[in-house]
């Protein structure tokens, strides 16, 4: 629900900025001529800088906000991605974009009314996201923790853009990747589910040691939310469990730490469905079922040679006792170690006495009611 509301807000913002036939004050002909050249001279580099200076100024000064999306499209159409292999063009474009977009963001922060500032900042972040240039990541970094949830989400989307991650991994840019990871680490504690999803995706795909730490912290945040019966948007956990499972396969040295989070998070998903069956709404139950079934199908089959798909069978039969029995069989209970921790050699941490836990922490009894939005269609 939260993710849908946020995306609706972003969509409404974008809808304000519909394409306008009257837009087009930015003259792209000079830069199009430069794009066709194999070797650039000083005057060509100035054309690139002038183009970005003019385009970003148009964004800032637009009185008809419907023209901004057109300007963004023109900038992206003339970006380095359209000039494969032209290093001079790419270098100058990045340098000029960093300068002019950076200056524009500073100016936009002080614009009034606040709605105007919001529209300019969000559109500049959308532009940076479209450009997907690792050399520009310091621009959205300062907005990752913004108090406005839409601005924060868009900034994190820039930083975790799969194209950015692909370039960082291919170009072996650990310093930039670590800078992003550090910024994301700072906001995990206060991030809503949709932002946590972006962080988890980045953490699972970036090739730096800090990636696994970031993923474990996201999992810990979700585990704590389940423990306190305050979790929102349960569907997110299918992706987080998938990322953890992938790490357990690709990084044997992280199998114990990732396995512990995988086991506890999956257990809480199952326990929430069982213990909250009478108080959860239809949407929450459907999301939990999706997580259980997707995880059984896409993750457990990586670790169990002959999967029984007992979770699916129990859910289809509406048999909560059978579901709990399979939970205990797979993950463990107070009487025995589960198949998964035994097979993958992980535990569940330590209890209050310092003894090693061989079974998941039990979810507290469900409260009498949850302060949650109504189910879809209700």
Image: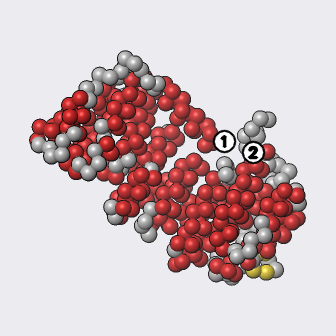
Secondary structure, mark 1, is: loop
Q: Position of residue 277 (x, y in %)?
A: 83, 53
Residue at point 69% right, 58% down? 294
**First in sequence: mark 1 vs mark 2:** 1
Q: Quadrant of the C terminus?
A: top right
Q: Is residue 262 left or right of residue 310?
A: left
User: Residue 277 has which mark?
Assistant: none
CB contact under 8 Å: marks 1 and 2: yes
Q: Quadrant of residue 111?
A: top left
Q: Tag 1: Cα neighbours inside 10 Å, few (<14), some, or many (≥20)? A: some
Q: Which residue is mark 1?
A: 1
Q: Position of residue 84 (x, y in %)?
A: 29, 48
Q: Is residue 74 left or right of residue 96?
A: right
Q: Quadrant of the N terminus?
A: top right
Q: Which residue is mark 2?
A: 283
* Residue that protrudes farthest toward the top in the picture: 22
Q: Position of residue 341 (x, y in %)?
A: 68, 77
Q: Is residue 271 visible?
A: no
Label 1 and label 2: CA atoms lie apart by 9 Å
Q: Tag 2: Cα neighbours inside 10 Å, few (<14), some, or many (≥20)? A: some
From the viewer's side, name the closer residue of 81 and 346: 81
Secondary structure, mark 2, is: helix
Q: Position of residue 77 (x, y in %)?
A: 34, 36
On screen, residue 136 above or below 228: above
Residue at point 34% right, 64% down? 172
């Amino acid at each position: 629900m939260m993710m849908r509301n946020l995306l609706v807000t972003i969509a409404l913002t974008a809808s304000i900025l519909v394409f306008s036939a009257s837009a087009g004050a930015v003259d792209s002909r000079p830069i199009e001529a430069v794009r066709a050249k194999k070797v650039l001279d000083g005057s060509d580099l100035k054309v690139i800088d002038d183009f970005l200076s003019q385009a970003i100024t148009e964004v800032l000064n637009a009185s008809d906000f419907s023209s901004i999306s057109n300007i963004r499209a023109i900038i992206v159409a003339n970006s380095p991605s359209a000039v494969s292999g032209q290093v001079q063009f790419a270098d100058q474009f990045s340098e000029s974009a960093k300068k002019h977009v950076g200056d524009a963001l500073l100016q936009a922060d002080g614009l009034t009314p606040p709605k105007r500032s919001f529209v300019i900042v969000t559109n500049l972040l959308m532009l940076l996201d479209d450009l997907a240039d690792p050399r520009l990541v310091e621009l959205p970094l300062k907005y990752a923790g913004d108090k406005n949830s839409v601005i924060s989400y868009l900034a994190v989307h820039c930083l975790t853009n799969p194209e950015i991650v692909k370039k960082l991994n291919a170009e072996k840019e650990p310093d930039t990747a670590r800078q992003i990871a550090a910024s994301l680490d700072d906001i995990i504690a206060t991030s809503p589910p949709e932002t946590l999803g972006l962080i988890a995706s980045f953490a699972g795909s970036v090739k730096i040691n800090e990636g696994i730490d970031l993923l474990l912290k996201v999992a810990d945040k979700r585990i704590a939310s389940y423990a306190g019966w305050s979790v929102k948007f349960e569907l997110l956990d299918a992706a987080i469990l998938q990322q953890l499972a992938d790490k357990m396969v690709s990084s044997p040295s992280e199998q114990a730490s990732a396995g512990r989070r995988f086991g506890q998070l999956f257990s809480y998903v199952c326990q929430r469905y069982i213990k909250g069956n009478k108080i959860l709404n239809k949407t929450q139950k459907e999301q939990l079922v999706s997580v259980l079934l997707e995880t059984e199908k896409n993750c457990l089959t990586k670790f169990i040679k002959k999967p029984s798909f007992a979770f699916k069978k129990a859910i289809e039969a509406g048999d909560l006792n059978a579901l709990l029995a399979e939970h205990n069989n797979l993950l463990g209970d107070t009487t025995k170690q589960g198949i998964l921790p035994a097979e993958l050699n992980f535990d569940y941490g330590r209890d209050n006495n310092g003894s090693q836990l061989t079974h998941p922490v039990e979810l507290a009894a469900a409260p009498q009611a949850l302060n949650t939005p109504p189910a879809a269609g209700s």
